[in-house]
Amino acid sequence: KRLLLLNGPNLNRLGQREPKTYGHHTLQDVESLVTEAASAYHYKLECFQSNHEGELIDRLHEAEGTVAGVIFNPAAYTHTSIALRDAIASISVPVVEIHISNVHAREEFRHHSMLAPVCMGQIVGFGIEGYRIAALGLINKLENEGR
Ligand code: DQA
């Protein structure tokens, strides 16, 4: 059984990037944390980060038939990308949206998610711990639905 952890633009700079908002942990820390959480439930984790919308779309398409679920921080594309929304809608694999910061307590343009309506659920505002919460919520749903 496999899961995919997908991270969008600028998340390769976690740890250095706006630490007051996103903390001091790196993307590697995030990937290790989710790998560990998933392995406790016997799921293998694939990790992918890209700053390019098209590469994220390709990775979502590849998720179909190869992984049981996706944990996705679409970063700024959350607020803009109809193409990513359509990509999620085009696959039957469930996707959980996660944001490190509380986007609702920030600028108005971060309040709306183009992707939330086609995702299984959304976790916001719990720092990188949100990735673990997203993974556990996703696994719980998968197991309950017998997928
Ligand atoms: C983010 C929130 C987005 O608004 C922002 O563009 C990001 C990171 C978060 O994890 O809090 O790059 O997705």
Image: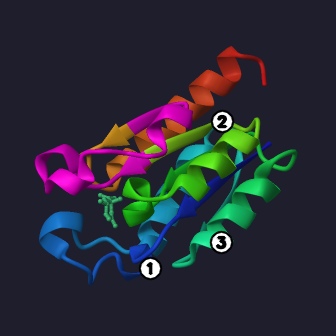
Q: Give the number of the disc on residue 12.
A: 1
- What range is drawn magenta here? 98-122
Residue receiving disc 3: 54
Mark 3 crowdedness (10 Å alpha carbons): few <14, some 14-19, many ≥20? few
Q: Give the quarter of the image for residue 15.
A: bottom left
Which sits earlier in the primary sequence, circle 1 or circle 3? 1
Marks 2 and 1: which is nearer the front?
2
Residue 22, compared with residue 13, is above or below; it is above
Q: Give the quarter of the image for residue 122.
A: top left
Horizontal side of 27 relative to 69 (left or right) equals left
Q: Amino acid at mark 1?
A: Asn
Tell me if label 2 and label 1 are in contact, CB under 8 Å. no
Q: Give the number of the disc on residue 94.
A: 2
Q: Residue at x 71, y 16 (%)?
A: 145
Q: Is mark 2 within 8 Å of ligand 1?
A: no
Is residue 105 located in the magenta-colored stretch of the structure?
Answer: yes
How far is disc 1 from disc 3 in space, using C-alphas? 17 Å
Q: Which image quadrant: the N terminus? A: top right
Residue 32, compared with residue 115, is above or below; it is below
